[in-house]
Amino acid sequence: MTGIISIIAGLGDKFAAHVLLSASALALGILVALPLAVWASRSPAVARITLGIASLVQTIPALALLALFFPILLSLRVVFGEALPTLGFLPALLALALYAVLPILRNAVTARAEMEAGVLEAADAVGMSGWQKLRLVEAPLAAPYIMGGIRTAAVWTIGAATLSTTVGQPGLGDPIFAGLQTQNWPLVLAGCIAAAGLAMAADFTLALVERGLSERRPWLRRIGFGIIALGVAGALWPAFVRNADDTVVIGAKGFSEQYILARLVGQQLEKAGYSVAYRDGMGSAIVQSAIESGQIDISLDYTGTIWANQLKRTDNVPRDRMLAIIAKWEGTRGVDVLGRLGFENAYALAMRGQQARALHIETLSDLARISPRLTIGGDPEFFERPEWKSVETAYGMRFARERNFAPTFMYDALQSGEADVISAYTSDGRIAADHLAVLADPKHALPNYDAILLLSQRRAGDKRLSGALKPLLGKIDVATMRQANFMVDRPDDKKTPAEAAHWLERQIGLGGN
């Protein structure tokens, strides 16, 4: 419990970012919902259409809604220019605001529909204009019900905002996603407790305002609004005291190795005098777009990933030639490839060693012969990647069943028999620890996956920054990276990514705590 409390105490910046995002999305949701409610209350057709659309939005999973705003905003750059953000705060704000609309709109429309006809007729009888009736009669009577909808929307928004990590927006989803990927349950619990606590505090505060409206007690409303104002001001404070220009933003994908390498890079930069912020849990496409647009300054990627996903290449070339082609392509997009870190984290298919020996499987050709009897597990993007299509085509793989698992759970799925084969990563420490058999690829269907360091255009010319990072190049061999990964992934005596990064720093002769 002490560990969880300690983690929560260190979530200050993420808590502040979560408050700002949730409050902004809720405010935008209110701004959209209330005018619509007024319009809908005067037209049954508008009420049906607006409530139908708002309900339809609720059926879209929040994660998908967040992701959908990336291509939408990207296409809008034609109109608004390249400065329009496609990741981070803006897509998260828009998606969450849409989610907040329904409960506010529905409560407001219901409140208006349930008003006593005599009250409205009396307002008309005394000659009130439409605006006077809305302001003096309808709004006061509907306010407690609308506040009920706002309370519901606030709780939904704060909960859904944890998913914004996937589009590069910092918040309380960061520890949750990081903890899930590394099976660090105290980290998951800390993020959940902080998010739940914030939702309960918001609900309590808004309940004060609701009571103030329904019981006509202005001092309750003032207390409620005062707490909200203080909370938002407190969340804004870190943004004012931080010098954003000096903060280097490091992007990382959602698995242990990326978390460790991001901290390793961050530690080198902090020693060089830079402030560092992390954007964890991003997908491959999101990371590439973020480094191109300058929304992150540094990313760690793999040549095979860029080769297949971005360049859409399905052929394999020697690793030096692949790196040269990638560096040239990244250069055309304003991204500088600083160099290789020294190890390769390639995709590979792995089985339990005992099962592989029993079935006499050593290569992907051997596996193809019995694949129709087996289940294969892959990370959520593996079966859509060109590498998998290449393996299917080269070897004629046809499995009985394909299943998706989060990267960290694939190895558990293999050990428990939920999968017979998994798409492993060659630098994963669990390959040796779990005695897995990595199957050879005699037809070279899978490309090279050298780990490389990328700099955004804004940081490419910073000699002090590149000078601080160049000592990392070529220093990390795959055996050392596997050990560092296993320190985070192992079930007992787990280390945090930062602790593993310090260990890695010492192993490659760069100091560390």
Image: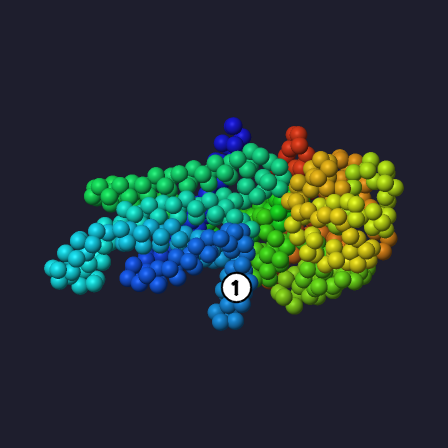
Task: Quickly name the residue at label 1.
Answer: 72
Judged from this view, the residue extending furthest toward the right is 360
Residue 312 is situated, as x and y percent measured from the top left of the image, at 71, 64
Find residue 463 and report its horizontal and vertical position in percent.
Answer: 62, 57
Which percent across, then down, holds residue 93?
45, 55
Toward the left, the furthest residue is: 126
Residue 371 visible to the viewer: yes
Q: Which of 371 and 379 lies nearest the eye of the viewer?
A: 371
Q: In this view, does 107 lie to the left or right of 497?
A: left
Q: How many marks?
A: 1
Determine the residue located farthest toward the bottom in the rendered image: 79
Query: Is residue 474 shown above or below 356?
Result: below
Left or right relative to 396: residue 471: left
Q: Say which residue appears at 59% left-offset and 48% top-offset.
A: 281
For the C terminus, the image quarter is top right
* 382 relative to 367 in the view: left or right: left
- Disc 1 marks a residue whose amino acid type is Ile
Mark 1: give few (<14), some (14-19) or many (20+) Cα within 10 Å: few
Q: Residue at 41% across / 41% down in the picture?
A: 199
Q: Residue at x 82, y 38 (%)?
A: 355
Q: Residue shown at 36%/52% (left/top)?
A: 106
Q: Classify residue 122 by image quadrant.
A: bottom left
Colour style of the rendered protein structure: rainbow
- Does any portion of residue 169 appear in the rendered image? no
| Quadrant in the picture for residue 464 | bottom right
The front one of 226 and 202 is 202
Q: Is mark 1 on a helix, strand or loop?
A: helix
User: Residue 109 placed where, x, y %?
Assistant: 32, 54
